[in-house]
Image: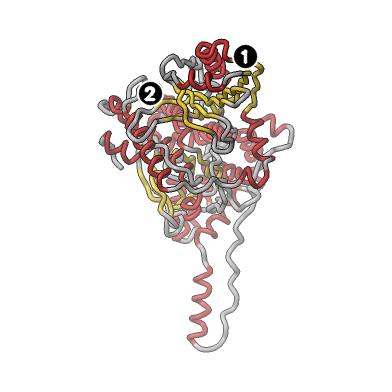
Amino acid sequence: MAKNPRTARHRRSPATRIRSPRSSARDAVPPAEPATTPPAGTRSSVASWLAGKLIRYDAESELRSKVQGFIFHARFGSDFDRAMGQYFGRAAVRRRTLVMDEGETPGLQEWYVNDYRTRGGKRLIDLFAEEIGPTLPPAEAGLLTAWRRMNHVRLLEVQAVISGSGVVVQDLLSGETMTVSDRSAARNLERWWTLLARPHQAVDRVCFTGAMMALPPTFKADILDSARALWASYQTTDPENGLAGFYRHHGLDLTKAFRRLSEEAERPPAVLSAEGHPVVASRAEYRLRDPTAVARALAGTEEFVNTGTLESHPEALHLVWLHRGRSSVPAAATRPRHALALQGEWASGPGEPLYRTLGDVEIWPDRLVLETLSRERLRAGKALVSEVLGTLIQHRRDSFTTLESMLEKADRGGADARRPPAKPGRAEVAALRDLAGRHTRAWLDTSLEALDGLSPREAVKHPDGRAEVIELLKVMEYYESAKRQAGEPAAMDLALIRRELGLPE
């Protein structure tokens, strides 16, 4: 029986396994200190000795030690080998080499004790209850009953984190809500994370065992689809044992599915443009002879807006390319799952319309540079620039830099590249808040693929759509939390969205 974990979680690592302090499945809690002869003397000295012995007695540790001694008896040696084959795969066992980090040890142990069926068809914890249970003191017998009833994996969602105390979680299959008093969970988890965990009855509280895995809300739908498919199948084959029986029967299947998703979540997500294309820093350079005529021609269109000279280079003029008028970039046919989309927006001032930005144009005395974040945008931008400027420019070359190369270059930039941005002034903060508010209001009436083409305001009018909007807001809250902890301004006003849609805060 693994104890509660203590771990540190890397910020924004998309998947978290909360680790147990144990390093081996065969580790056991030391038995209670043996009794010694009471001291001679007065009644008070004898009473003090007895009090000390009572304080040192720990029913949970005693019971855990007895269970571990029972399950690792030689009579279950073949069962342990068989269980290892089920847990890690027979091929891994045949090679006699298991790659297992410390965080997997409590998961293996808890499953072996509580869920694995021996060759005789019974679980080890049930055999222990039959053979050793009648000899246990009342406190240990009560705990054993609670463990047999409660100790199975459950698919949970964090509803709230109680600082320094624990978490409120909801079972995603039954809807049951419970408060778990676990300070380690309070330190390491966030609201709306999905857990595969074992609530565990301690002497005075419900906590988690060390066998816990966690995924961000972006992966909730994936694990829930797997769980619901297993649950539907189980209900047709063994309907009498209910959800607890399902969790025990399919706990290992859920663990393996969670493990696969955790591996996927640990990989950096694909980063895309708003149109769904891979982010690639794309640059086209042109020769020009008359920068004034070029600037006048571009600024005279609705697609390009003159924002003034570059702050670091007063001799260069900057224009922003907007998604309006003749601007058109084809959308990608497919998008990778769990990808991140980058979208910049521009407005001429407070209260003015928002437009998606597609790129930037710099006009120097001897050259024009068009920069975008995808090859597809560059192709569309070059066609538009050529249409507007004609013979005023002559193409020289294109260049492309992958996102990986950009990140490597930033890492090599030293302290200056890693220095946090300057704190925005009052005017900039006000502008960012105005932008977030208008972006939020626009989002409320935007047709979204995630809502089958409906806008959030349309979707909440129907029960299924309302549920989908609520789930979408959980993912948005996850990303906004990351921005807030990184010291970045919020992109969306989630409280405003909930008020506008009549959703609970």
- Residue 277's spot in the image, x, y percent? 54, 21
Q: Amino acid at mark 1?
A: Gln
370 relative to 263, above or below: above
- Whichever of callouts 2 and 1 sits on the residue coming sooner in the sequence is 1
The total of numbered circles placed on residues is: 2
Among the 4 quarters of the image, the one containing residue 362: top right
Badge 2 marks a residue whose secondary structure is loop
Among the 4 quarters of the image, the one containing residue 405: top right
Seen in the image, is 193 located left or right of residue 287? left
- Residue 254's spot in the image, x, y percent? 51, 33
Quarter of the figure with the C terminus: top left
Tag nearer the camera, 2 or 1: 1
Badge 1 marks a residue whose secondary structure is strand
Q: Amino acid at mark 2?
A: Leu
Q: Determine the residue positioned at 48% across, 86% down.
A: 43
Residue in the foreground of this view, choosing between 273 and 338: 273
User: Which residue position is annotated with label 2?
Assistant: 448
- Residue 78's spot in the image, x, y percent? 66, 39
285 relative to 74, above or below: above
How many other residues sit within 10 Å of disc 2, few (<14), some (14-19) or many (≥20)?
some
How many other residues sit within 10 Å of disc 1, few (<14), some (14-19) or many (≥20)?
some
Among the 4 quarters of the image, the one containing residue 255: top right
Q: Can residue 471 be seen here?
A: no
- Residue 414's spot in the image, x, y percent? 68, 44
User: Which residue position is annotated with label 1?
Assistant: 394
Q: Can residue 60 be seen here?
A: yes
Residue in the foreground of this view, choosing between 126 and 233: 233
Spatial CA distance of label 2 from label 1 is: 40 Å
Seen in the image, is 20 located left or right of residue 504? right
Residue in the foreground of this view, choosing between 343 and 282: 282
Q: Determine the residue positioned at 35% across, 41% down.
A: 176
Residue closest to the far bottom:
42
